Image (tube, rainbow, N blue to C red):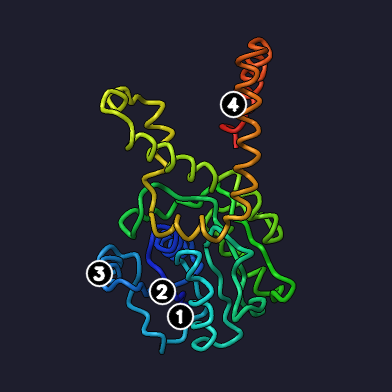
Amino acid sequence: MNALGLVGCGLLGSSFALAARRFGCFDVVLGYDSSREVNLHAMELGVIDGIWNRKIRVDAVCIAVPTQAIGAVLREMLDIVQDDVPIFDVGSVKASITVNGESPPSNFIPCHPIAGSHLSGPEAAREDLFKGNVCVVTPTHTSNPTMVDAVVGWWEKVGAQVVQMSAEAHDKSVALTSHLPHLLSYAIVDMLRNACDDTKTLVGSGFLDFSRLAGGDATMWRSIFVDNQDNLRIGFRELAECLTLMLNDAEQNPDDLERKLRDIAVIRGTLDDK
């Protein structure tokens, strides 16, 4: 029996559990969540086959907890599983993961599936969540190549397109493509909260589309914003410069602004093909 130990039964962990069992990566998924209610709910939904009491040997471990908790869970796992058991995570920030201030062990393979939803919890899990989406794997200089291949194989089996890069390059990239857009979405909704009632009555589909990201899991995004704050600050400064240039064009060179907006619209159109 090929068993996966799942720590954290949220959207990503639960979706991987469903997909991994569906596509033959593992026969059994044993799960553990810090919330007893979530544990029981995940069992009721069929996401996990049972509660992992840590005494049962598993063949791999998936850590699916907020980024700030990954290091602590990893340290705990090293005392529970043998060093021939691959451990991987699904966190959105990679460079901050350490064990007692040092690089992770050779059996830890950092991963980040670029997939998700504004919904959360095991009830939102989908076995097709990763199909056609990128999963970034960021091996360290100590990562066991055989275990890297095994983890890559599991992600490919559940439908993900695996890309490998350094943790630093990953964190810088997702600050722009994911973390900064989410931060801006939270900020714009916060601005609306402080606006007058007349402004709130004018909320339309554009605002709703843009602000959808602010409906995500607050605990998860708190961890991401804290762990990747350096790259977020860099991205925010670049964004401020971009906005300033566009507003200057609005005042001084409206034709240049229109050309820029048309160019940007073309770029946006190409993203739908990805």
Q: Where is residue 28 in the image (x, y as percent from the top left)?
A: 41, 74
Identify the secondary structure beneath mark 3.
helix
Q: Which amino acid is tagged 4?
A: Gly
Q: In which quarter of the image is the N terminus?
A: bottom left
Residue 170 lies in quadrant: bottom right
- Residue 96 appears at what percent x and percent y? 60, 66
Which element is circle 2 on? strand
| Camera-side residue of 198 and 112 | 198
Q: Are marks 1 and 2 in contact (CB under 8 Å)?
A: yes
The disc, 1 or 3, on the residue closer to the chain's N-terminal end is 1
Quarter of the rendering containing residue 94: bottom right
Q: In which quarter of the image is the C terminus?
A: top right
Reading the image, the residue beneath label 3 is: 37
Badge nearest the viewer, 1 or 2: 2
Task: Point out residue 81 in the picture as x, y percentages from the top left corner.
Answer: 52, 86
Q: Which mark is residue 269?
A: 4
Q: Name the residue under label 2.
A: 28
Kind of residue indicated by mark 3: Glu
Labels 4 and 1: the sequence-earlier one: 1
Residue type highlighted by circle 1: Met
Q: Mark 1 — residue?
A: 1
